[in-house]
Amino acid sequence: MIQNPAQPLTRRRFTALVAGSSLLAAPALRAQSANRIVLGQSAAFSGPAAQLGIQFHAGAKLFFDQLNAKGGINQTPVEIVQLDDGYEPERCAENTRKLLADDVFALFGYIGTPTSVAALPLATKAQVPFFAPFTGALGLRQPFNRMAFHMRASYHDETALIVKQLTHLGLKKIAVFYQNDAYGKAGLDGVTAALQAQQLAPVAVATVERNSQDVAKAVASLTAAQPDAVVQISAYASCAAFIRAARKAGYGGTFYNVSFVGTQALADTLGKDGAGVMVSQVVPTPYSGSRPIAREFNAAIAEGGAKVQPNFSSMEGFMAAKLLAEGLRRAGARPSRDALVGALESIRDFSLGGFNISFGPNDHVASHFVELSMLTGDGRVRT
């Protein structure tokens, strides 16, 4: 191991509004009822970040499908309504208003910082739980928000480990390639804070626009600084484009990524060019049976999830669904949203298949687990 609510809509008006929306392979949007628990998810299911949403959703759906086959939560099935936002904040906000208007029980598994930043104020105003967003931005965690629950470690946790690893190896000339939005800036802040703790600073920084692979200027700027390593805070398509272009320009240093990059998607995109690329992880590896949660996940795939690719993103979705199910169980037979919040806060020192989880009334960050993994260049990932 390398260590603000929308105006209420009538059903007819709402149906008309969503008739042309990007609803994907999900139950038709409909009001919450006593005989099912409906979760709403807005995520990237198209565009350069699509694999993040697709894989997370696949893992979560795998868990809930198998849970429902056994009776659901207190004999109540759990469904996820998914809407595609293409990793664009404006589309995410529109989707969130639609989901809230249809009275989903909770918002679940939103993908990304800029989209979650757009959605969380809407969820907060509506007093709807916002559970397990796929982001480590501190701005979504501080100040404390009673509606927001985070399963994963923060980008500050991830970048602290990355900087610690690099400086331990004697690599102190560190550059940052980051996405020009709230996500990238959150990661940049993490790297900068970790370096400052060691009286260091980034030797160079450069940006890429969200959903873009136009990296030529960034490559020229960062390679000119001759860094020992480049920490990348973006999604897999732009990070892969940067790595390929930097290497073509003669750069021979190391590349480090945070977990949001989408590890398997990055490995698949890079192929042999991925050899030696590092990625920090916030959930255990799905490729080893050393933890019960990984064995459970792979057994679920073998049982009925043949279309689910076992990777870090899908396993995070599976784990998030399992954790939410535990909260729903504790919330009682006919849970209210307030009861769910209280139930989640009661989950302390809890083992999620060997992955330690702890919430509390004033702490909605379940884990600070981080470890490093490396791409092998043949599509595999080693931890």
Image (spheres, grey):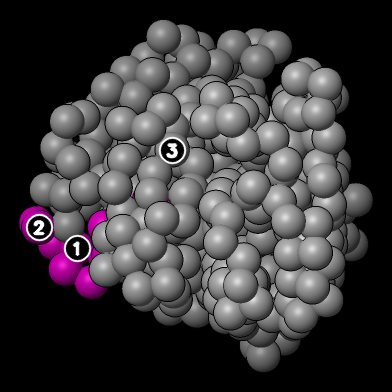
Q: Where residue 351 sits: x, y (%)?
A: 32, 18
Amino acid beneath label 2: Ala
Q: Taking 243 as reference, is 121 above or below it?
A: above
Which residue shows up at 81% across the image and 28% down it? 200
Q: Secondary structure at mark 1?
A: loop
Q: Identify the residue at image location x=29%, y=47%.
A: 382
> Which quarter shows the C terminus?
top left
Residue 14 forms part of the magenta stretch: no
Residue 172 position, x and y percent, is 69, 35
The image quarter containing residue 27 is: bottom left
- The quadrant in which the N terminus is found is top left
Mark 2 Cα-neighbour bin, 10 Å: few <14, some 14–19, many ≥20: few
Between residue 281 and residue 329, name the one nearer to us. Answer: 281
The residue beneath circle 1 is 305
Using the image, tell me which numbered label, if any, was put on residue 302: 2
Tell me whether the residue at label 2 lies in contact with that at label 3, contact meaning CB atoms closer than 8 angstroms. Answer: no
Mark 2 and mark 3: Cα distance apart in space: 27 Å
Q: Residue 109 location in percent, x, y?
A: 55, 51
Residue 306 shown in magenta: yes
Viewer-nearest residue: 239 or 334: 239
Asked where in the image residue 364 lies, by quadrant, the reply is top right
Q: Residue furthest bottom?
A: 20
C-alpha span from label 3 to label 1: 27 Å
| Among numbered discs 3 and 1, the one appearing first in the sequence | 1
Report which residue position mark 3 lands on. Answer: 372
- Residue mark closest to the camera, 2 vs 3: 3
Going by the image, does 359 lie left or right of 55? right
* Circle 1 crowding by C-alpha within 10 Å: few under 14, some 14–19, many from 20: many
Identified at 24% across, 34% down, the residue is 293
**Which amino acid type is marked by label 3?**
Leu
The residue range painted magenta reads 302-313
Q: Are marks 1 and 2 in contact (CB under 8 Å)?
A: yes
